[in-house]
Image: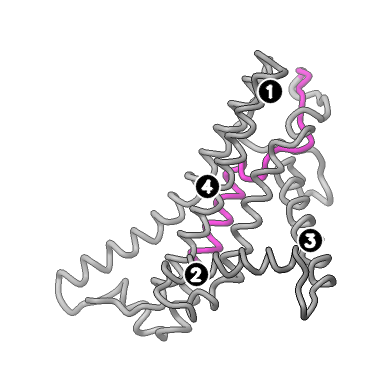
Amino acid sequence: MIPISIKAEIIADIADFPITNTLLASWLAMLVLIAVAFIFSKTLKEIPGKFQNAVETVVEAVLDFMSTIAGNRETAIKFFPIVATIFLFVLIANWMGILPGFGSIGLFQNRGGEIEFIPLLRSANADLAMTLALALIVVVMSQIVGIISLGVKHHFGKFISFKSPVTFFVGALEIVSEFAKILSFSFRLFGNVFAGEVLLIIIAFLVPYIIPMPFLALELFVGLIQALIFAVLAMIFLTSATQKSAH
């Protein structure tokens, strides 16, 4: 039987707090990010070497790209840290999901009288709870940014306005769109990552050697695109939160 589960599996409980395989994978992704950031910060030099120069070139290129989305470089620089962090976390979590051991190394547990295989690690973004959390972070942060930039009155004036029936209806649509952002954000990333995970499991089960290689390369590309889309949308939402409503 091919081990496919749409929900994350619990591998341990610590003080009644369930530790799932996707949560463990997300912790590993965070550890990788923290370790790389720490090591890179210790190797920074005033006169950059080849590697540092290459990283700075990539950062400048990304900032230029984000500036076209944000409308100006100042706004792009303001939101770059959070957007870049989200991008790197999603990218690393996606790419780690295709490493050897993910989905294939695990435990056999007795559940309801049946022995089930529970993988120790699964792609973090194959868990809807994880993608929903990321979506909530972006949307809630956009609300906070809007309040700080425009003030409470002007920000919530986008959603609640009694100037006319038209502005009231537009405000109601804005409220619906905020909830739609959460759903589209979370389900888009979850759907693509989970579908890729299922595809790799099936291909590896049917033809376990050479054939899966092109699909692994495809998943690397899809993981990059999904991380980029998530980051671009986050920049759009944060930037739009700083702009006053037209109505």
Badge 1 is on which residue?
3
On the rendered image, what quadrant is the N terminus found in? Answer: top right
Real-space Cα separation, disc 4 to disc 1, in angstroms: 27 Å
Q: Is residue 208 left or right of residue 41?
A: left
Residue at figure coordinates x 83%, y 51% from the top left = 15
Q: Residues within 10 Å of mark 3 (few under 14, many from 20)?
A: few
Circle 3: residue type: Val
Vertical order, 235 against 196 (above or below): below
State the SS at label 2.
helix
Badge 3 is on which residue?
36
Residue at figure coordinates x 56%, y 65% from the top left = 83
Q: Earlier in the sequence, mark 3 or mark 1?
A: 1
Residue at figure coordinates x 57%, y 44% from the top left = 128
Disc 4 + disc 2, Cβ < 8 Å: no
Q: Earlier in the sequence, mark 1 or mark 2?
A: 1
On the rendered image, what quadrant is the C terminus found in? Answer: bottom left
Badge 4 is on which residue?
225
The magenta segment is 113-139
Q: Earlier in the sequence, mark 2 or mark 3?
A: 3
Q: Earlier in the sequence, mark 4 or mark 3?
A: 3
Q: Is residue 46 left or right of residue 193?
A: right
Badge 2 is on which residue?
64
Q: Nearer the viewer, residue 45 or 239?
A: 45
Real-space Cα separation, disc 3 to disc 1, in angstroms: 33 Å
